[in-house]
Every structure is written in structure tokens, then in C-alpha cells.
Amino acid sequence: MLDLAYISAFSGLRSIGDGRGVIARERRGIAIATVMARKGQGTALAAAVKEHFDINLPLGPHGSGSVSTSFLGTGPGRWLVTHDAGTPRFVERLAQQLEGLASVVDQSDGVGLLRLTGPALLDVLAKGVAVDLNTTAFPAGSVAVTQIAHMGVTLWKVDETPTFHIAIARSMAGSFLHWLEASAAVTGLVADG
Amino acid sequence: MRIPCPYCGSRDSSEFSYSGDATLTRPTPDNADAMFDYVYLRDNPVGLHREYWYHAAGCHAWLKVTRNVSTHEVIEAVLAHDEAAS
Ligand SMILES: [Zn+2]
């Protein structure tokens, strides 16, 4: 199989404005897959995920992970899986591990990932996200599939700093950066690497 | 209007598509008259009603939402596939 050259989804990310309100970094080289449980296989799927990854498959909109692999609940019987340890053919192997239990689709080249943090992050996200992201309603580990400026996003809170990871269709990356720059310019947006 | 998605939590109605009357049962395809009524003839109820809403911009689940169509008060939302299974 031909290995294609990697091209960054967020190569247009740049610092803007004064200050360090929001700090953004692209997460690169991550294997990404959607996993959808086959009919009636929910229990067996959870057992397989436990066996292969020692992860308790989340049944609600939460993330659950090991050091390098995360299963993020995105809907009933649906997960977004990310793996950042660079294991070759990770998604192919995942599909084999979950054979007959779930449909696994490689999204590594279709989804861009950003890591966002900074003291003004919640205020900036509030300009685009109609979901309460404060600690009481949305503690670390929570996942939301929603939209920002009509663009579908999956976001999850990694810690209470707060740090968010955000996944967005790669074809929307440019438009999303436009929204981020416009929304964070007043507090300063720092492109970190 | 906000809809309490059983999976995602409270979300703005703009994330959902309205997908029709949830009180009807689809007739068998060979019953043309019943199918005509099912597809084309709509009641216009006042007060409590049950409707399908699809969480298109969220978890992609179909919901059965009970709401007061006069006041827009949402009383309950359940996953349609849960209800179908029970
Ligand atoms: Zn939902």
C-alpha cells in the first residue's frame, strides 16, 4: 500500500492579537477512527475493548482512555477513537480486534485535531458553543458533539486548566480557524508549535 | 426551545431536525389508502403532542419528544430505539 505524504490540517494556524488568552496547538500524527457497535453486540464490544485496551467503554458522552488511546462517546453505540503512540496500522488492527462487534472507519485523514487551552478559553468557546462547558455541568472527561458557527465539532475536556481537544472535519479546518481567530483576537491567540 | 437529549443533555433546537408525528404507525405498503393517510393527511393537534426529532448536529439519535405545541414546553424526550426495544 502506498504511504501518502502527511499534510497538516491546521497549517494556517497563526498567532493573532495581544496576550495569551487562548493557546492552540495542532495534534498531529494521531490515528482516528469511528467505531459503531453492531446490532446486539454492545456487551461483547465492551468486553473486547476491555480485553485489548484495558479501557471501560463509556456508555454516555464521556471519554475513557489509557496513556495513548481514548474512546470518546459520541452517540448511542458510537465512539471516536484516537491513538497518539504512532502504532503503524493502528486502525486496521482495531478493525480486526473488533471484527463482527463494531464497524470501524478510519478518519485519520478526514479529521483535524486541535488542543486548546488558556485563561480565556471558556469565554472564547462560549462565543460558538451552545453547551455549558463549566466544571459543574461539564467536568474533565466530558465529551460534546455539537456545532460551532454551523460547523460540526466533537470537543472534550481533558483537564480543568481547562484544556480541550477538538475534532473537526478537515475540510472545515480553514473556516474553523477563521472563527477561532475572530473570536480569540481580543484576548490574544497563540499558535503553540 | 431546548430539547433534553437523553444522550447529550440539554441542546438548542437548532441542532435537531423535526421528523414528523410520533403517534402514527406506518401501515403495510400494500394498503394504499392507509399509506396515503399516513403520508399526506396531518392532524393539527393543540396541547400535548409526541414528535420525532433527529439530533443531526449531535449524537445522531432519533428521539421521541413529548411537548406542548401551544406553549413549546418540552415534557420528555426518550431515545426512539430504546422505546422500540421495550
Ligand atoms: Zn443527542
Image (cartoon, rainbow, N blue to C red):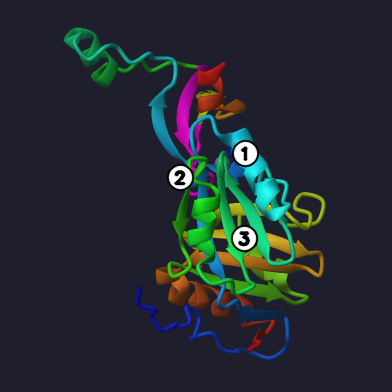
The secondary element bearing badge 2 is classed as loop
A50 to the left or right of B38: right
Task: Examine the rendered structure and indicate whether residue A80 appears above or below residue A76.
Answer: below
Q: Is residue B49 magenta?
A: yes
Residue type of the residue flagged with mark 2: Ala
Q: Which residue is mark 1?
A: B7
The secondary element bearing badge 1 is classed as loop
Residue type of the residue flagged with mark 1: Tyr
Residue A166, disc: none
- Residue A63 appears at what percent x and percent y? 69, 54
Which quadrant, please, contains the C terminus of chain A?
bottom right
User: Label 3 neighbourhood size at 10 Å, few (<14), some (14-19), many (20+)?
Assistant: many
- Residue A139 appears at what percent x and percent y? 79, 54
Give the mark, 2 or 1, whose residue is nearer the N terminus. 1
Q: In this rendering, do the residues under marks 1 and 3 share a single chain? A: no
Can residue A169 be seen?
Answer: yes
Instruction: Say whether mark 1 is within 8 Å of ligand 1.
Output: yes
Residue type of the residue flagged with mark 3: Leu
Residue A80: quadrant of the picture = bottom right
User: Label 1 neighbourhood size at 10 Å, few (<14), some (14-19), many (20+)?
Assistant: many
Label 2 to label 3, Cα distance in Å?
A: 16 Å
Please state the extent of the stretch shown in magenta in the rendering. Answer: B47-62
Q: In this rendering, do the residues under marks 2 and 3 share a single chain? A: no
- Residue A187 appears at what percent x and percent y? 69, 81
- Indicate the chain on which mark 3 is placed: A
Label 1 to label 3, Cα distance in Å?
A: 15 Å
Residue A155, disc: 3
Q: Which residue is mark 2?
A: B56
Disc 2 to disc 1: CB gap under 8 Å: no
Can residue B4 be seen?
Answer: no
User: Label 2 neighbourhood size at 10 Å, few (<14), some (14-19), many (20+)?
Assistant: some
